[in-house]
Amino acid sequence: MSTPTLGVIGTGMVGREVARRAVDAGLDVVLSNSRGPGSLAGLVAELGTRATAATAAEAAGAGSLVVASVPLAARGQLPRAELSGKTVIDPMNYAPHSGFAIPELDSDELTSSELVQRHLANARVVKALHNIGPKQLTELFRPAGAPDRTALPLSGDDPDAKKEVADLLDVLGFDTVDLGTLADSWRSEPNTPLYAAPYVGRPPSGLTAGEYVAWVQQAPGVPVPAARIAELSAAAVRGPAGFRM
């Protein structure tokens, strides 16, 4: 693994747990969020000496790879200049609601990652780490070659960038399955067989939509091999974009 430092922009549930997994795997991490470095003192202390806090621009500049773990609606705030030439991991998902909709996504003209790539025109965007919950991410990692190693899908337009991300995920404890280009990334977006459900198993019956989301967030992880990821991707049918219950 030739990536000594991971930049993380956004420290919600996904950003935090990716940073935690990276530090545990022996990588240095530079963290940032919208509230400024001072707000990250507690998290940095918890993660230890491999973690530091910075501004988003500093995290983008410091990272050999950068995880842009911000809400999709905030994609325009990502530091384009500092991310120029970088490989950027996009774990964002589209969740339309009464106050937020993106016509190009609703019409399936673009995928959400193509929209991110449009903003970060000089970066190399790779869709990954978007379809597994933070709890499962921290439970399912295994050493290379383990019989119960879990695989994660990724998509991107640049083969070298996808290789970089696959190498990173290998260090973090996961195999990968290449689904194709950013235009193909819908195959692992919300409302497809690859989104969240394979990593948690069958839920209890009778759950409301809110109860199901809460259950997924706390469910023990279920290992999913690469062959199953490929099978579920092939079976996906494109429907309405975005997370809908």
Image (cartoon, helix red, strand yellow):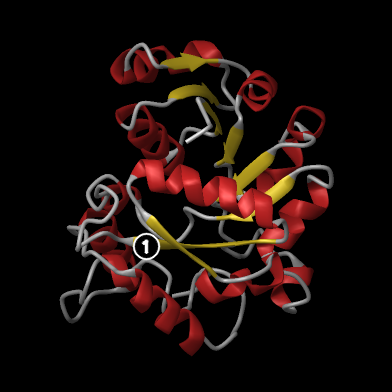
**Element on which disc 1 rests:** strand
Which one is in front, 170 or 88? 170
Residue under circle 1? 151
Which one is in front, 138 or 210? 138
- Left or right, 123 with respect to 150, comes to right
Residue at 19% from the left image edge and 63% from the top image edge: 147
Residue at 42% from the left image edge and 81% from the top image edge: 232
Above or below: residue 163 compared with residue 57: below
Figure label count: 1
- Left or right, 99 with respect to 107, comes to left
Which one is in front, 108 or 160? 160
Neighbour class for label 1 at 10 Å: few (<14), some, many (≥20)?
many
Above or below: residue 241 compared with residue 34: below
Above or below: residue 3 compared with residue 152: above
- Left or right, 64 with respect to 211, comes to right
Residue 237: image location, x then y, percent: 55, 88
The C terminus: image quadrant: bottom left
Identify residue type, mark 1: Ala
Residue 1: image location, x then y, percent: 47, 36
Residue at 24% from the left image edge and 50% from the top image edge: 142
Residue 120: image location, x then y, percent: 78, 45
Residue at 61% from the left image edge and 65% from the top image edge: 96
- Left or right, 84 with respect to 29, comes to right
Residue 84, quarter of the rendered image: top right
Residue 35: image location, x then y, percent: 56, 22
